[in-house]
Image (cartoon, rainbow, N blue to C red):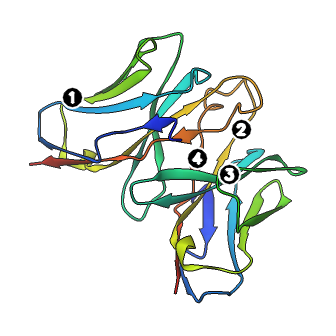
Amino acid sequence: DADVTQTPRNRITKTGKRIMLECSQTKGHDRMYWYRQDPGLGLRLIYYSFDVKDINKGEISDGYSVSRQAQAKFSLSLESAIPNQTALYFCATSTSDLELSSYNEQFFGPGTRLTVL
Amino acid sequence: DQQVKQNSPSLSVQEGRISILNCDYTNSMFDYFLWYKKYPAEGPTFLISISSIKDKNEDGRFTVFLNKSAKHLSLHIVPSQPGDSAVYFCAASPLSGTSYGKLTFGQGTILTVHP
């Protein structure tokens, strides 16, 4: 079973619609992230959360909002989608436990391909 | 301002030869560096990392080299295999301060290994 899951995997929507992308993880990590990937631009951070009560903007947060419903769940919303939000969206998790060898790594979900017409 | 740059959008290599992927960074606060590999329709997966106290880290066919004075790192894959064909992302992070835990990614390099 996948440790980080994202729903939906693909979504086509129209300009002005509200969209929610969901992310769930079973890794027990406290930190979660949302990125978007665009050709030639790599992965850019939208929002991140270091625990349930901590939400922070990334480098490209305009037009997006997030909700951390539980340690395992982190959702990304586009309140009014526009065509330049067409991209691949990835959720990622990491641990703040310094005892773990993986504490500097982020673990990614399979991604959501969003198309805004 | 792109703090992590991968200036080669693509690289084509023959099976069995060496693949060298390069990455440059500008932020001197970065002290941990990672390489991720991404196949189509999948999320990026961690490949190898290096901390700034080292200049080399090796894991099987993969070796990462770090030149701190030049703010440059490279990933060497020897020998290259067709299954290595993927997009490779370089990422960097500080290990302290308010940005600890955040990764800054490069644009990615598409590696194609021909049989």
> Marks 3 and 4, how far apart in space?
10 Å
Mark 1: amino acid: Val
Describe the element under mark 4 as helix, strand or loop. strand
Task: Pinpoint the chain carrying mark 3.
Answer: A
Residue indicated by mark 1:
B78
Measuring 91% from the left and 50% from the top, which residue is drawn there? A53
Q: Is residue B87 above or below residue A87?
A: above
Q: Nearer the viewer, mark 2 or mark 3?
A: 3
> Marks 4 and 1, how far apart in space?
25 Å
Task: Pinpoint the chain carrying mark 2.
Answer: A
Residue indicated by mark 4:
A107
> Marks 1 and 2, how far apart in space?
31 Å
Residue indicated by mark 2:
A95
Q: B102 or B113: which is nearer to us?
A: B102
Q: Is residue A48 left or right of residue A107?
A: right
Describe the element under mark 2 as helix, strand or loop. loop
